[in-house]
Image (cartoon, rainbow, N blue to C red):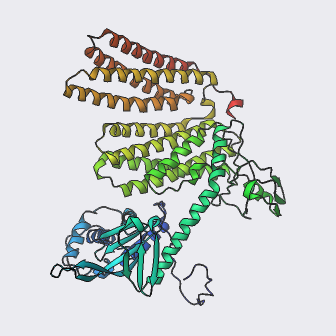
Amino acid sequence: MLPARTLYEEGVTPNETLCFARQFFGQSWDESDPFQLELMYLQSNDSILTEEYPCSKKEAIEFAALQFQITFGDHKPDKHVPGFLNLDQFLSPQWRKEKGIEVEILNTHKKHYGLTIQKAKSKYYQLMRTLKSFGFSIFPCQQTLQFEDKRKEGRMKFKTRNVKLGVSKEDIVLFSSENVILNQWSLWKLKSYQAKQNIIVLDFGEHDSELVKLTSEQATKIMDLISGYIELILKVREDKEKILVEDQELHEAVLEDPDFEVAVGVTAYVPVTYTPQQPLVTRQNKRPQTALIPGSIKIQNLSGPMQAHASFDISQDTLAAAKFSFKGKSEDVKMVDLASSFKSTKLLAQELGSASVKWNVEPTLNMANAQAQFATDKSQCFEGIMTLLSKVKADPNALSRQTVDMQATQIASHARNLSAGCRNISALSGEKQKSLIGSAQSIASSVSDLFAVMQSVLNDPTDVASVEGLIGVEKSVQISQMLLENVKPEHTVDEGTKKLMGGCLKELQSGLAVLFDSTELCAASLPHEEKEKLLLEVRKAEARAGWLFKAAAELVPYALCEPVSNELTKVTLELKELTQQFQTKHSSLTTHNSTQNRNFNKAAISVCDSLKYLMEASLTSEPHSLDEIV
């Protein structure tokens, strides 16, 4: 059915039964929602069995085994034997007649013993998303190959083979009849394409020396699909060029201008009934002077391409919803993989940490609903983080990029929601709760650090810095969670103490850098094996000191909170212990060089003094005045 036509125009009568399905599969979903999970599973199952997403024999067996677990439960040796399955219900037509495949399904099913129905359905959906064919529209085609006849020189021979052409919004892929990828091209590299009768010709210019010629009964449909995707690419490119300058100006103004206040205004359609699921967003390159009057909304004095003047009726309730919050660059990032998720959370941490951003959000949510949604977002965010951490700690070599990409986008999405929840609660409480926004920033920062470490682990699972980095990220997440759950506005230290402790942290960072640099200088004169061993120790220590220093920086502003103060004490003791270990190591290496010893010891004393002053400042700090908190 065509989306643009009504049911009446499609000729649907009142007595007919319609089957609905999701047009798009999202990257995140709520596993606790049985309806959503069931819908995802049923549609995924249909896509596999009808070969909408072709898969290899090994993948088909795994899908069938999971479906077996969902349908019949755990393996029963006396019951689940060859002949038990109706293969037509568990396999696509391509694999139903494969010899011995039922035995392989039964053996694979045994491995899922104890897997719950919900987990099996979720795993089925996740596995479908990892298919190379996922996201492609698949068309059966024939390809004619031309090659030289070895028997008769100068004579060409032709051979026709069955293939499948996959078209997505980003790529064009040629599959063999066994679903092996024969060739893959980016849609952006397509120079020209045409269809005449049932013959398709694709020209990728310099990216492929030969034209791709295929025969298909669906040639027209293939051309329409490619044309649609190319139009979409051109439109996206044009839209990006239009908003790039004004978006960048707004972002820079918010993050750099200390006097900039996020504007409140209406620049487009406002729905009559507003719910939190309908976010109202404004994009403009200068602050508009917008009059908000009960009974009507007027749009005036808008600069640039948004110049307009209009008025329409609006209720007092909707008026409260027409106050917008700053839409940062983090929300413009389309999160599709690990790299884009890292970029989004990195920007989110910067935006939350900018003192110039004044969050003027007054949503129609009441406090009870806002807190309930916040609790859900918090739970999902931390659960996702710990799940990913547990997987990488268990076996870094077993990680697949597809799995990491999918989980990263989910975690980044939860971090966005969590940050929005912090802003909502802060606004509804009538205070600019810096402690709550600070906790949200800490979480966003921890998540971006997690993604950076995950990238290093994927590149080299054995890298020392990556392994130590995982420990640091886990600690950072725990601290972020502690800040979120324990810190209140009155726990923020006074401005003078904060500056004093900030100075201690700078001295601490400088001293640690000298410690490690001095040790590396000593390593240069050692035999190769000893040198490599010492340099490895330095790398481990640098990574450990890095996350300990970051932890201290996150804890310092809220040292009046007892759990935070206790954690800060633990961190400083670990840093002191690390310093003493290197003092012992260094003194044994440089007894012959008094200058190196003197510089190193001076740096070590500086580190210890900085730690001492840091703790003294935290113990003598006073609460931030309420006027400064609000």
**Nearer to the camera, 626 or 593:** 593
* Residue 55 showing in the rendered view: yes
Quarter of the image where the C terminus is located: top right
Coordinates of residue 281 in the picture (x, y in percent): 67, 55
Name which residue lies at 39% across and 16% down.
604
In this image, 77 relative to 300: left or right? left
Q: Is residue 289 left or right of residue 331?
A: right
Percent across and percent down for residue 458 are 34, 48
Q: Residue drawn 41% across and 24% down?
A: 513
Q: Horizontal and vertical percent for residue 398?
A: 29, 52
Q: Nearer the viewer, residue 425 or 355?
A: 355
Label tally: 0
**Quarter where residue 584 is shown:** top left
Which residue reaches farthest front? 154
Q: Is residue 473 above or below residue 579?
A: below
Relative to 371, residue 556 above or below:
above
- Give the x, y percent position of residue 20: 52, 78
Q: Quadrant of the N terminus?
A: bottom right
Looking at this view, name the residue that lies furthest to the top. 594
Q: Is residue 275 above or below residue 485?
A: below
Query: Which residue is painted at 24% across and 65% down in the image?
Result: 110
Would residue 395 be visible to someone looking at this image? no
